[in-house]
Structure formats: C-alpha cells, structure tokens
Amino acid sequence: MASEKNGGSYRDMLGEILTKREYEEMVKGYDILGNIAILDIPKSLRKKEKKIADIIMKIHPSVKTVMAKAGAISGKLRIRGFRHVAGEKNKIATYRENNCVFKFDITRTFFSNRLSFERKRIVDLVKDKEKVLVLFSGVGPFSVEIAKAHPGCKVVGVELNKYASKAAEENVVLNKVTNVKCINADVRKATSKLKNSADRMIVPMPTASLGFLDEISVYAKKRAVVHLYSFGAAETVFADIADRLGKHAKANDYNIQIISKRVVGSYSSREIEVVIDYIIKK
C-alpha cells in the first residue's frame, strides 16, 4: 500500500464508510504512481469505490486520477486492464523515484512502484564503467536510474513491448542521460547483438525469468553478476531456483556462485516474489 499522509487517516476514514467485513476485504489497499492512484478492490465493494477514491484524493492532493485494476496481468506484453473511478480521465502517469522521473500510459505497459527499493539496491551495487544489460526493461526504470547514478556505465535495455520501449527512449531524454540504449526486441532474438556483452544483468520478469537461462548465460561475459527475480512457494522457492540454476550451469559448461537472496514481497497467499543475485563464471 502507498504511504499515507496525516498518520493513519486513510484507515480511520475507511472505517467510517465500511463495515468490519468490508474493511477486512480492503487489505490490498492502493498504489500511487505520481498523479495516479490505483485501487485493488474486490467486486463486493464496487458500490463504494468512488467514496474510497475520494478518501485517497483527499489524503494525497497530488493524486488527480484514481483507477481500479480490472483483471490480471496477461500476455507477453504484461498488460492489465484498468477502470476509471474518480478524478481526471487520464492514463498518463508522471512518477518520480530515486531522483528520476518517468512518464508512461499505465494501460499500455507494466510498471511496479513496489520495486523501487530493488532499483535503489542495485544502483548501489553497480560499479562505474560496467556494461549493464536489463532484460524486460519496460519503460526504463532500472536502465535510467543506473545510468543517471553511474554516467561511466553503458546500459542496454531490451523490451518486447513497442510502446514501452518508445516510452523508455522518451524517459532517457526526460532524465537527461546519454548512456542508455533501448532495444525493442524479443529477448530470445537479440543474441547476435548482446552475446558476451554484460558485466551485470537484471532480469525483472518473475513470471518467466527461469525460462530464459539460455539467453542469460549467452549474454553474460566470462564473469558476470545476474539479478534474477522469480515467484515461488515460500517454503521452497530459494532451493528450487538454486537447483534450476545449478542444473543449467552444469549442462552448459559454466559455474555459478550465489551471492545473495532476498524476499521482494508477497505475490499471492501461497507465493512470494524473490530475487537471487549470482555470479556466472564461464
């Protein structure tokens, strides 16, 4: 949930319009992407969503539009449907994070503000003059933030979604960075351009990252750091990922060294999102 101004006023004000059962159903809360707030609201509360939206806009004066999620993320382009709830009928978010600003149409691309800590964490790990490759780079948050903090680095972002890749190019200009290249391509089909190119690789595609281990190993230099995001059962996810990585390394004649692992957040009642940082040694 987004951070709240005025203490716990959101919860207090929500309690005034919802029954105890309805309040418990609202545990998912909302996210704020600059001028747009996004509600995750159950069907049972649709009749009260306008009142909930009004509360959010009262607490956060910078929010001018409230949208509600309308369906799950789907397809290769990771698109989700949204429904306008209150405020201006606008789909373009202007979102600021880690001294950078991003503009994008929330209905045409995937974006998660819940990875802001991860983006800052990796920015702090990057070393000057590294060649950094971001797979599934979206509108450029990892690419731009790394490039701005490390002007001596060369950063390449690969994104299949044509709109997102174009928005990333615009965000590069918006943030006045010159060391980012945006490639609109399928990650699997960019082999000739990216082979043995990366000192560090970021793979923020938790639903499918483990299906791209071939590409990750090909794009890595003889020694490269990989930040791989994935979903899995809380009890076994780290062991399962380590097993997949180890088997792939053995079958393809390289070695890996896992250097860190952490939980990013909850995905569902049974699954969590995690990141594993590891070194590829060819």
Image (spheres, rainbow, N blue to C red):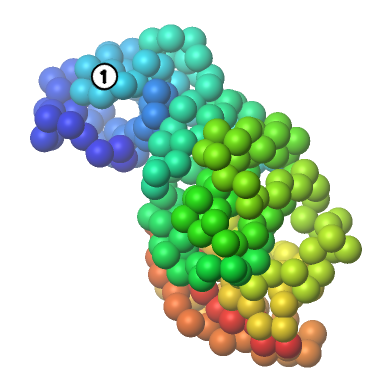
Q: Position of residue 83 (x, y in %)?
A: 51, 18
Question: Could you tell me the amino acid type at mark 1?
Answer: Pro
Left/right of residue 154 with respect to residue 147 in the rendered view: right
Left/right of residue 52 with respect to residue 194 in the rendered view: left
Q: Position of residue 211 (x, y in %)?
A: 72, 64
Q: Quadrant of residue 58?
A: top left
Q: Quadrant of residue 50?
A: top left
Say which of 128 and 156 sits in front.
Answer: 128
Against 251, residue 205 (above or below) is above
Against 202, residue 145 (above or below) is above
The quadrant of the image that shows the C terminus is bottom right
Count neighbours of disc 1 (C-alpha within 10 A) and say few if under 14, some if 14 to 19, many if 20 or more: few
- Residue 40 in sight: no
Against 162, residue 218 (above or below) is below
Left/right of residue 217 with respect to residue 172 in the rendered view: right
* Residue identified by numbered label 1: 61
The quadrant of the image that shows the N terminus is top left
Q: Position of residue 156 (x, y in %)?
A: 68, 55
| Residue at point 39%, 47% (across, down) | 98
Say which of 237 and 101 sits in front.
Answer: 101
Q: Position of residue 109 (x, y in %)?
A: 62, 34
How many numbered discs sit on the rendered protein?
Answer: 1
| Residue at point 63%, 52% (across, down) | 179
- Residue 31 in sight: yes
| Residue at point 81%, 69% (across, down) | 195
Element on which disc 1 rests: loop
Against 49, residue 232 (above or below) is below
Q: Quadrant of residue 235?
A: bottom left
